[in-house]
Amino acid sequence: MSGLPRRLVLGIGGGIAAYKACELVRRLKERDVDVRVVMTAGAEHFLGAATLQALSGQPVRTSLWDASAEAAMSHIELARWADAILVAPASANVLARLAHGFADDLLTTLSLAASDRPLWLAPAMNRLMWAHPATQANVELLRARGAHVLGPASGEQACGEVGEGRMLEPEAIIAALSIFEAPQMLAGRRVLVSAGPTHEDLDPVRFLGNRSSGRMGFALAEAAAGMGAEVTLVAGPVALATPAGVDRIDVRSARQMHAAMLEHAPGMDVVIGAAAVADYRPEQRQTRKIKKQDDRFTVTLVRNPDILLDLAALSPRPYLAGFAAETEALEDNAQLKLQAKGLDLIAANLVGEGLGIETQDNAFSVFWRGGSTVLPRAPKTDLAVSLLRIVAGQLAAKGGRGT
Ligand code: CTP
């Protein structure tokens, strides 16, 4: 089962990333998805309709007023026909027009008419255009209305700059789309996820933290909600937007995260510890700002509680999944943590420069009692779906809740 929508309208916005749409159509066709392409006027500057017509095997639509295409299927019929709409690339302009309900070309009109269908957006633009508060506000609005936003990824851009704004690669988009049919996989399940770093305060202005971005945990929460679960996300201090349909609880320190997780875990079917919890905290938090004095300054750290370990003691115990970020001996360390923390599954990855932490991509070796698999390098959104498919499969095999 591919999990992909059977009938997909692919909207192509203007931007250099439009060239990737050709590959996207080809790969969707390989997976037996029936694709109907709609191009904006901007997209036509970058791509020829004939290419997409040949790849999709269907007429390509460019205008609301295209007489021949209208005769084949009106925008209303096309909206009814589609199982889902994917816009890739979604330019800043397309995002703005979708956010504000414009209906001045075929793609925007169609998107309004298909508002009962899932909408997937793969933004692509210059990093400053992406970071602009106007674009971010538009994306937030679309997300809040239930649109699934895929990426963008970071890296070198066509304009020569480096930053966030690259469209996800076609395979990554397809992987994310594959939760389309997955809703049933976690329907009726309650899932609790922790995400991000924790900050351990030294005084009113300083803390000990780590470089966790929170992206993996947020991707898991988003994917779990997309797969039909009721999701609670306990987030450390990160600036990420709350995924649609997810209940979020913000915490700061490991002890606050511990308390929130233990409070919400009872009644959950699945608990996933994706947070990078600080193992130690300063023994004392000074109420006043620490002033510089001697050349040496010693801070005594004390152990924080282990959240997953304490969750494993619950009865009934939810299905427990954790992560192991290691710089060496990946499998040995992961197997040790699986046993020591009493987990059902552990996803292990190597961390270091450009790997695992602060990145969009990752790769995992996944271990459970009696089995393992490798999830090759992919965006965290894609890995989240793959991991949850494993979890859902194991839950179904186990039957029922808790142990
Ligand atoms: N974890 C936790 N509570 C802690 C520390 C970690 O629940 N106090 C969870 C993390 O959310 C993660 C898993 O345990 O799912 C492993 O985290 P990691 O930092 O790799 O392992 P540690 O147990 O901290 O072991 P070490 O730092 O010695 O490798």
Image: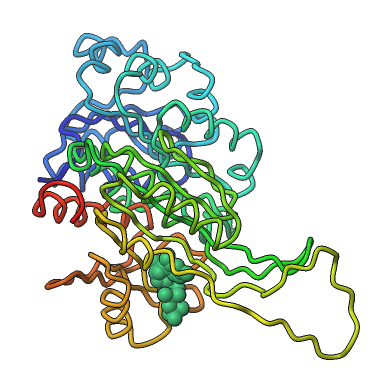
Outermost front residue? 315
Decide: is 345 above or below 230.
Answer: below
Q: Residue at horizontal 22%, vertical 70%? A: 374
Q: Ligand 1: which quarter?
A: bottom left
Q: How many marks?
A: 0
For residue 52, what is the image quadrant?
Answer: top left
Depth order, front residue of 79/183: 183
Decide: is 23 above or below 46.
Answer: below
**The C terminus sits in image quarter:** bottom left
**The N terminus sits in image quarter:** top left
Would residue 1 appear left or right of 165 to someone viewing this image?
left
Residue 355: give x, y in percent of width and height.
45, 73
Q: Residue at horizontal 29%, vertical 42%? A: 190
Residue 261: give x, y in percent of width and height.
44, 53
Q: Residue at horizontal 21%, vertical 48%? A: 27
Decide: is 103 above or below 85.
Answer: above
Depth order, front residue of 102/56: 102
Q: Does residue 241 appear in this view?
A: yes
Decide: is 119 above or below 298.
Answer: above
Q: Does residue 362 appear in this view?
A: no
Would residue 58 appear left or right of 281 to someone viewing this image?
left
Residue 167: give x, y in percent of width and height.
43, 48
